[in-house]
Structures are given as C-alpha cells and as structure tokens.
Image: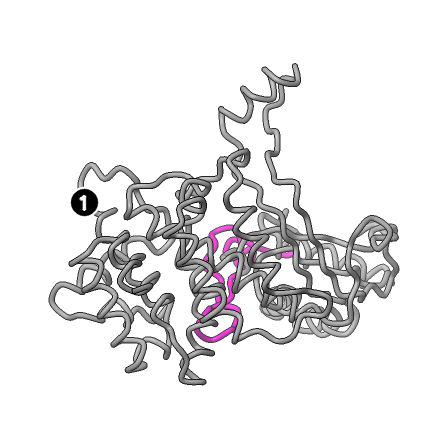
Amino acid sequence: AHPDTRIVSLTITEGGYGIDDATGAFRPVDAAVLADLEGSSSDVPRSVLGYLTAALRRRRDAGVPGFTVMSCDNIQGNGHVARTALLGFAERVDSDLAAWIGETVSFPNSMVDRITPVTTDETRAAVSRDIGIEDGWPVHSESFEQWVLEDDFPLGRPALDEVGVQLVDEVLPYELMKLRLLNASHQAMSYLGILAGERFVHDVCTDPLFVGFLLDYMHIEAIPTLEPVPGIDLDAYCATLIARFGSEAIRDTLARQVVDGSDRIPKFLLPVVRSRLASGGDIRRAALVLAAWSVFLERSAEPGTALPAVDRRLGELQEAAAREGARPGAFLDYAPVFGELGVDAALRAAFIAARASLAERGARGAIEALQG
C-alpha cells in the first residue's frame, strides 16, 4: 500500500488464480482465497488476491494510484488471467473497489523462460560441497534465460531493457511459442518417458526416438498453430529446446513436470489440439500424450506404484481414467479439463487409437508406430 510501491510481481503457478479452464471465469477453490472471501475487511489476508485487494483498497482510500500487477506465470495471457482473478475477487468484496481497480491498475502480459527444477537435498549438498555455503534453499537453473514483457507501467518501471528484458507491445506470439513448444513438450516427453521407465529429462531428450517424437510434435502439430514471432527463427528455437532439455547438469525430473497435469495440459497442449482440429490438421502425437497421461493416472492408482501422481483433481482423474476399460474415450468426458473439446469425434478417434497402441506396443513402440 506504500506510495513508493509501483509494481507487484506474481509467480503463483498455473492453477493458482482460481480461473475455470473451461469457462475462463473466476471460480476460486483455494482454501486461502475462500477464507479471505468469507472474512471481514479487517481480517489479515491469507491469499495473494486478498493481499492485493486489501492493499489497493488502502491506496484508493489514501488517494494513491493503483500499482502495476505483473504476472510471471506460464499461462497464455497471464496478465489477462491475473486481471480476471483480481477483479473477480474484488467484485465479491466491494464492487466499487473492483471498478476502481479495473480503471487504474495495469496488468501487462509476460513470458518468462528459464528451466528451474525444484530444490532437493542433492542440490543443497552440491552447493555445500562445491561452493562451501550452507544454503537451505539454493536455486538450481539452466544458463538460458528469456523474459518478454509488455511495456505497460503507468507509474514507471526500472530500466529492464538494459538488463536483457525484451519490452514489446504484445507478448502473445512469444508466449504461444513457449507454451506450445517448450511447456507442451515437457508434457509430451514426461508421460511417455515415465511409461518407458525413464526418470530424468536429459535421458529422454538424448534418446533419438524421443527426440524425433518431440521434434515431430513441434514441427507438425505445434508450429502451424503459432503466429509469426518477431526476431525468432522457430526451427532454431526448437533445436535449442532439444539441447536445453538434454542438459544433464540440470538433472530435471519427469516427475516434476507431471505435477498438476490437470492444470498444465489445458494450458499447454489442448490449445494446440483445438487449433489443429479447427484446421483439420494432424493431432496424433498430442493424442498419444493424452493417452499416456490417462494410462499414467491408471497405473498411479495401483498399490505400491513407483511414482504416485500429484494433482489437486487426482481422485476424479483416476476415476475418469478407470472408465476407459468399459468405455473407450471416457477419459475425455472429464469436463474440468476437456470441456467441450472432449466430445470432438476426431479427437476421440485419435485418443482411442493411441490408447490401443500403448496397450499393444508400450510407450516406445507407440512412438515408433507413429514415426513409421
């Protein structure tokens, strides 16, 4: 609420804004957000949206302009998503305040790209051994970094352009590139890689079979859905992705990439499927990824599974996957993920064929059959 605060940046993760993937409307399910909505205006907020709303109320009452809310999450139109969430929250608390926020607060979209695996005991031990520092939460990341940001800061900003940030009028082409190539490829490699018995990203992405599959997904299915990206050679970008994924130094795990698949799949992979269906394009690789996800969920429900699934919708997802045995394609009826897309006949046919190929050939064999 301090007048000197001009930018509030957010990194919440894909599922944290309380936006319904099927409708795009604010529909909070997080306990902290719901507690803030049920409390009084004098309560200390528990959630991000509660803090932002309380701060903006104080600014308005003091005659201080609203700050810029800068989302840095892996979501298409992350600024639009943050705006929808904050206005939806504020509207339920104070409609006049919501109107003021809508008029005075800016929400620039951004695209941030740097692979940063979760901190582990191994990371902490390496920092202690190699650097001589006891750090409780060191951050292990790749050397690559890219930040593309819409230049929409009514109260001013630091000279971000002088330290490598790309300031643009519109982020959309860059974020679609990242979400549909990098983030969707994480999903594409992970479920199939896990079913093939792999654990690490670099092992999958130095395997010629998987590399060919990922490049085919990128070039045949994803790139045709993209807009031109100023200053980017997409072929070179895809090659760079494979090199980044293949870095053994990161030791990124497939398990990390499949956490909360029901939040990631709709944001990264399904937009590609939706666009390709609209144009009559090939979706066999994306369908195989969805089929692998459903098989992974089925197996994760088995006692003693080596890699339990982690998802806020896990029980419902496992039930949906279990219905495949009696009714092929039933997994696509799970509306919180697939919405109206699940009834598409072409998607259902491709998904059912992919499930059958996995059952007959296994993950590697199913990939080989596509490439054959």
Q: Amino acid at mark 1?
A: Glu
Colouring of the image: one colour
Q: Is residue 62 left or right of residue 223?
A: right
Residue beneath disc 1 = 302
The span picked out in magenta is 18-41
Check residue 19 for magenta coloring. Answer: yes
Residue visible at 30% across and 42% down in the picture:
308
Coordinates of residue 14 in the picture (x, y in percent): 52, 57
- Frontmost residue, 40 versus 308: 308
Check residue 158 for magenta coloring. Answer: no
Coordinates of residue 313 in the picture (x, y in percent): 35, 56
Please state, as top left, top right, bottom left or bottom right, where the C terminus lies in the image: bottom left
* Occupied quadrant, residue 169: bottom right
Q: Residue furthest left?
A: 326
Coordinates of residue 199 in the picture (x, y in percent): 37, 39
Coordinates of residue 182 in the picture (x, y in percent): 53, 57
Graded by Cα atoms within 10 Å as few (under 14), some (14 to 19) or many (20 or more), the crowding at tag 1 reads few
